[in-house]
Image (cartoon, coloured by chain):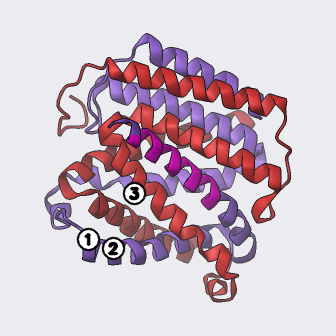
Chain colours: A red, B purple
Amino acid sequence: MNIALLGMTLLGGVLLSAQSSINGAFGQKAGALESTFSTFFTGMLLLALAVLFFGQGDVLLILDAPRWQLSAVWFGVSYLFLTILAVPKIGVTAASIATVIGQLSAGMVLDHFGTFGGVEVAFDVKRFAGLLFMLAALFFIYRGNKRRVETPASDSIAS
Amino acid sequence: MKFIYYLLALLAGISLSIEGAIYGELGNSIGKLESSFYNFFAGTIIIGIITLFFGKGSLGYTFKAPKWTLLGGLLGSIYLTILIISIPLVGVGLAMISVIIGQMVASMIIEHKGWLGSPRIAINKDKLIASGLMVIALFLIF
């Protein structure tokens, strides 16, 4: 059961990479802002259906939710827009790894202070070592990319 | 230079973490699917206004584009739903590790093959070293 779930989560990561590539490619043609908009718009339509059929909460409670919780959307928009800007320039691998590093570093800071009401996890030596390993990884990705052989992006899924 | 785009991607990751932490709280009060919906709904409004005033591209291209390039929103929603289902059952740490590993392997294959409109960049020794370092880092952090 847990193995199947982990497999699904792995697939989630695969989908996220696929999304970055697709959005990056679309953004090259339609524009970065336009690509972000299309993604949000189609996501909204799909989730509207999902909430209608499977929603167990109450959408209307949004009106009563604390304002600071609603501000998360600015970060959601920033994430997608910045990804669409970065992917065509540095490639999906470098963009994904840099994103993961930003995510984990910020996550460790939020954990340490228990910001936003999450569980408090102190920043210790192991986590610091993890941070160093991630910075080394970023360096290797950067170096690997400088030597890349580039061919023009193709329009088909399989080329 | 290119360097700035690495910073942008780092910033994207920081945003993702903050977003996740806050939505965890919102999800507890209004529901998880509802929080995702709120994100995409309010996001559509924000980016819609920005695009209206500052968009230099062509939104009309959406209708001419190959249909598979429109699947970004679908994939993002499936990803979010998978996470919502699995985190309570396997824990955030394990979920994050498998997402990240899936992401690294998939992006290297996509890039190596030049699939999904990605520029083709061959897998090289540096990238393999980088993924090895990331795996070590993940186990140190979680």
Q: Find residue A149 and report its image quarter.
A: top left
Chain of the residue displaying label 3 = A
Which residue is labeled 1 in the image?
B54
Which numbered disc covers residue A81?
A: 3
Q: Position of residue B78 (x, y in %)?
A: 51, 54
Residue kind at label 2, given as amino acid type? Ile
Residue in the picture at 30% in, 62% down: A33
Tags 2 and 1 touching, CB below 8 Å: yes
Residue kind at label 1, given as amino acid type? Phe
Location of the C terminus of chain B (image quadrant): top right
Which numbered disc covers residue B50?
A: 2
Magenta residues, start to end: B4-19
User: Is A114 located above or below residue B9 in the figure?
Assistant: below
Q: Nearer the viewer, mark 1 or mark 3?
A: 1
Separation of marks 2 and 1 at Cα, in angstroms: 6 Å
Residue in the picture at 36% in, 50% down: A84
User: Is A85 located above or below residue B140 in the figure?
Assistant: below
Tags 3 and 2 touching, CB below 8 Å: no
Q: Nearer the viewer, residue B29 or B134?
A: B134
Q: Position of residue B2 (x, y in %)?
A: 34, 36
User: Is B128 located above or below residue A58 in the figure?
Assistant: above
Which numbered disc covers residue A147?
A: none
Residue in the picture at 48% in, 76% down: B42
Furthest toward the top, the residue is B125
Separation of marks 1 and 3 at Cα, in angstroms: 13 Å
> Crowding near pointer 2: few (<14 within 10 Å), some, many (20+)?
some
What kind of secondary structure does the magenta stretch mostly adopt? helix
Q: Nearer the viewer, residue B94 or A53?
A: B94
Q: Nearer the viewer, residue B93 or B81?
A: B93
Q: Position of residue B36 (x, y in %)?
A: 56, 67
Separation of marks 3 and 2 at Cα, in angstroms: 11 Å
